Image: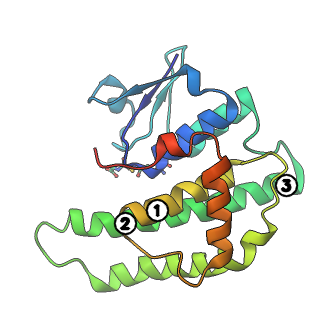
Amino acid sequence: MYKLTFSPASPYVRKVMLAAFRSGFDKQLELLTDDNDIRSQNPLGKIPIVEKPDGDCLFDSRVIIDHFNREGGGLIPTSGKDRDIVLTRSALAEGIIDASLLVVYSDRYAGGEVPSKMWLDLQIGKIDKSLDFLELDIVNWSDPLGFDAANIGLASALGYLTFRNVRDWKTNRPNIQKWYEDVALKLPGFNETIPVSP
Ligand SMILES: N[C@@H](CCC(=O)N[C@@H](CS)C(=O)NCC(=O)O)C(=O)O
């Protein structure tokens, strides 16, 4: 079995779980909810971490997804332009998640102070520009692998924006909305991984 540090709110954990569904690892995934030895394996203190059946630990979400892809396939093309495209789109989705988390953390870790508006504006600006870019680009996201790592990353990013109420990404973005509705219906594991508060 693969052991995964689980949090039902984490968009990075969600990415890993969706990748597990896509590459056939979901049946081999044991979800660990309590603090445990595996967490101490990442000195950065971040989740997700996966312990493989051989006892080795992997972090972060990109590394875990790369592992699932090598062992199960279906997430990242092996070579060529398609690989570059999927990895670049995945990086964009990851950047939206990173900026969203920084917005959430700027409040959570402000220690009672008012979070820096300059910092929040910087992060929100990254999210908005990415969404505007995607509204035009998403129509090109043909997906020969069927829900690759980029699609999974974006599904997780948009779900998190809504869950934490970071940004309204739907208004005036019909192309993203249409893509998301399709993903919500067809992406394996989508419903099982909808974020909830722990
Ligand atoms: N780049 C990492 C980011 C992971 C991350 O930031 N996870 C959050 C949970 S959603 C976390 O553990 N935060 C605690 C912290 O930053 O100390 C990945 O892709 O796995």
Q: Is 23 on the left or on the right of 156, as rendered?
A: right
> Which residue is at 65% across, 46% downward?
187
Amino acid type shown at disc 3: Asp
Marks 1/3: CA distance? 24 Å
**In the rendered image, which residue does mark 3 sit on?**
82
From this view, report whether residue 64 is shown above or below residue 177: above
Out of 75 and 83, give the one closest to the viewer: 75
The C terminus is located in which quarter? top left
Amino acid type shown at disc 2: Leu
The image position of residue 48, as x and y in percent, is 44, 39
- Sooner in the amino-acid sequence: mark 1 or mark 3: 3
Marks 2/3: CA distance? 30 Å
From this view, report whether residue 142 is shown above or below residue 23: below
Specify whether tag 1 is near ligand 1 (CB below 8 Å).
yes
> Which residue is at 64% across, 78% downward?
174
Q: Is 168 on the left or on the right of 65, as rendered?
A: left
**In the rendered image, which residue does mark 2 sit on?**
102
The quadrant holding residue 42 is top left
Tags 1 and 2 touching, CB below 8 Å: yes
> Which residue is at 18% across, 68% downward?
110
Tags 1 and 3 touching, CB below 8 Å: no
The image position of residue 183, as x and y in percent, is 65, 54
Task: Kindly state the secondary structure of the residue where label 1 is placed.
Answer: helix
The image position of residue 16, as x and y in percent, is 54, 40
Task: Kindly state the secondary structure of the residue where label 3 is placed.
Answer: helix
The image position of residue 99, as x and y in percent, is 45, 68
Amino acid type shown at disc 1: Asp
Label 3: how many Cα within 10 Å (few below 14, some 14–19, many 20+)? some
Out of 116 and 21, give the one closest to the viewer: 21
**In the rendered image, which residue does mark 1 sit on?**
98
